[in-house]
Image (cartoon, rainbow, N blue to C red):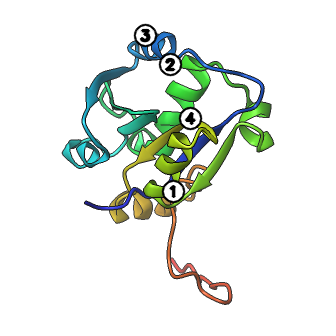
């Protein structure tokens, strides 16, 4: 199984979520089905799908609509726009504060932290394909926050030169 590109861990921040209610709201934008394990993420043909893991339960979330633009093909963008903002009703301030979300590139770490009760849920995302990354770069736009993870990290920065 491939390791997802980025995982978001929903921390306890004074809010306890009713996941069944949130999943009901999310059905507006996602086809949701309960699955047995995280490897079900590999079954998705849509790169913007993800898995929600809450203690002992995996839910596969697949966007209902066809992508309208390049960003609708990026899991982090779709999760942010349609699940975190619409289904969970999180605000810009909450999403950027560091109080609600944390990130890790390791699925096992996120799942273990949920099972230990340290965080409420984990979202497992598919890696962004190089063709999508290239298309976003060529469009002059930037990738959504925490949508990529590259390893090993370079000890210094990179310099890019664009020519026409």
Marks 1 and 3: which is nearer the front? 1
Residue under pointer 3: 24
Marks 3 and 2: which is nearer the front? 2
| On-image quarter of the N terminus | bottom left
For residue 61, which quarter of the picture? top left
Residue under pointer 1: 109
For residue 96, which quarter of the picture? top right
Q: Earlier in the sequence, mark 1 or mark 4?
A: 4
Q: Earlier in the sequence, mark 1 or mark 3?
A: 3
Whether 134 is drawn above or below 93: the answer is below
Label pair 1/3, CB-CB below 8 angstroms = no
Q: Secondary structure at mark 3?
A: helix
Q: Earlier in the sequence, mark 4 or mark 2?
A: 2
Label number found at residue 80: 4
* Relative horizontal placement of residue 43, taking residue 132 as reference (left or right): left
Q: How many numbered dots are placed on residues in this image?
A: 4
Q: Secondary structure at mark 1?
A: helix
Across and down, in percent, residue 46 comes to: 27, 41
Distance between mark 4 and mark 2 Cα atoms: 16 Å
Q: Residue at x 35, y 38 (%)?
A: 49
Front-most of residues 36 and 72: 36
Residue under pointer 2: 19
* Callout 2 crowding tier (Cα within 10 Å): few <14, some 14–19, many ≥20: some
* Relative horizontal placement of residue 123, taking residue 8 as reference (left or right): left
Q: Residue at x 28, y 45 (%)?
A: 41
Marks 3 and 4: which is nearer the front? 3
Label number found at residue 120: none
């Amino acid at each position: 199984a491939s390791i997802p590109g980025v995982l978001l861990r929903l921390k306890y921040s004074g809010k306890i979520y009713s996941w069944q209610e949130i999943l009901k709201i999310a059905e507006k934008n996602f086809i949701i089905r309960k699955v047995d394990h995280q490897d079900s993420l590999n079954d998705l043909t849509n790169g913007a799908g993800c898995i929600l893991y809450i203690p002992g339960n995996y839910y596969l979330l697949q966007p209902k609509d066809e992508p309208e633009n390049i960003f609708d093909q990026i899991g982090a963008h779709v999760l942010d726009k349609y699940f975190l903002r619409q289904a969970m009703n999180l605000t810009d301030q909450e999403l950027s504060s560091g109080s609600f979300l944390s990130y890790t590139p390791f699925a096992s770490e996120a799942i273990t932290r949920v099972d230990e009760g340290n965080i409420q849920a984990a979202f497992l995302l598919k890696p962004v394909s190089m063709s999508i990354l290239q298309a976003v770069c060529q469009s002059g736009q930037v990738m959504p926050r925490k949508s990529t993870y590259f390893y090993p990290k370079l000890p210094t920065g990179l310099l890019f030169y664009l020519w026409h």
